[in-house]
Amino acid sequence: MKYAYYISCINESMTKELDQSLFLWNSQLGIELVRLDEGTCCGGSNTDFVHPNVNLVNNARNIALAEKLGLDLVTSCNTCLLGILHVKHEIDSDPKKKELVNHYLKKQGLEYKGTSAVKHLLWVLNEDYGLDKLKAKVKKPLTGIKFASFYGCHILRPSHLMKGGDNPNAPRSLDMLVEALGGETVEYASNNKCCGFHTLLVAPEESFNVAGKALVEAVEKDADYIVTPCPLCHMSLDAYQGDSMAAMGKDASIPVLHLSQVVGMALGLSEKELGLGKHVVTTRSA
């Protein structure tokens, strides 16, 4: 199995341990990830409002780089997934937009054809690789560990773009992955809500309230960890956890992991290898 791996800005800078984990275990599963080092920022759901055509060309270029390799594009960031999928849908639905982006891409020797699928790492593991096959690879089952799965909104909505098979009102894909690794999952109301990351700069109090509600619910459900498929959700729930708990009037904490780290745990990698001690809220034993 081989994919073009889209490198998100956040994993290049503030959450390096998430990609570090992924590239430590992907070969164990026989998954080859070709880093798209020439890729550019997806725009974080913001450039579309500032200059739609720039957003189109930038993300069409990211997909075209994968197409040049003859590979599907995979990302481990929900926001990158949404941004790139949105552009793919726009271009595939409008020949004039396809002509526009290719006018600019031609200058770099690229062409957007629409042949490469855009996927999330979670979808690759669940659907392309398969949970039964993944379960057979587990070296250190996560037995007795309770996880609160926090999906984040950008991997669930809008549902017509998302091909992960989840019901956005009652998602199960991340829970199924955790269970295949031997872990237990807990149900809580905020698992499919926004993490508040995109409002941090303009409405921090609201952001802390949104994240805080999810954190408190997970703690009250006696979860040992929160697991998320998105590095931006990870940052919001981990780095700003103190502010969010304070907004809820709570003095509690819960470690937050990315799905790449949880998979690495089950495949036998150490806490140091997975960078668990680099989080603001460290694991119970770190």
Image (spheres, grey):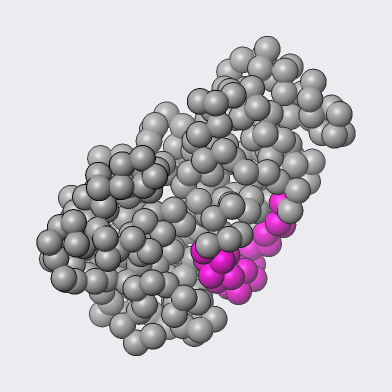
Which quadrant would the C terminus be assigned to in this image? bottom left
Asked whether 74 falls inside the magenta stretch, the response is no
Query: What x and y, as percent, mark residue 158?
Result: 39, 31
- Residue at 69% across, 20% down: 98
Quarter residue 259 falls in = bottom left
The residue segment tinted magenta is 15-36
In this view of the protein, which residue sits in the foreground, 171 or 133? 171
Q: Residue at x 79, y 41 (%)?
A: 68
User: In the depicted view, which residue is nearer to us: 256 or 145?
Assistant: 256
**129, 227: nearer the viewer:** 227
Would residue 231 be seen by someone viewing this image from the given angle? yes
Q: Position of residue 62 (x, y in %)?
A: 69, 40
Is any atom of residue 127 visible in this view?
no
- The part of the image, by quadrant, that contains residue 22 is bottom right
The vertical placement of 126 against 28, above or below, is above
Relative image position of residue 95 (x, y in whole percent):
67, 14
* Residue 19, horizontal then vertical, whole percent: 57, 65
Nearest to the observer: residue 280 or residue 283: 280
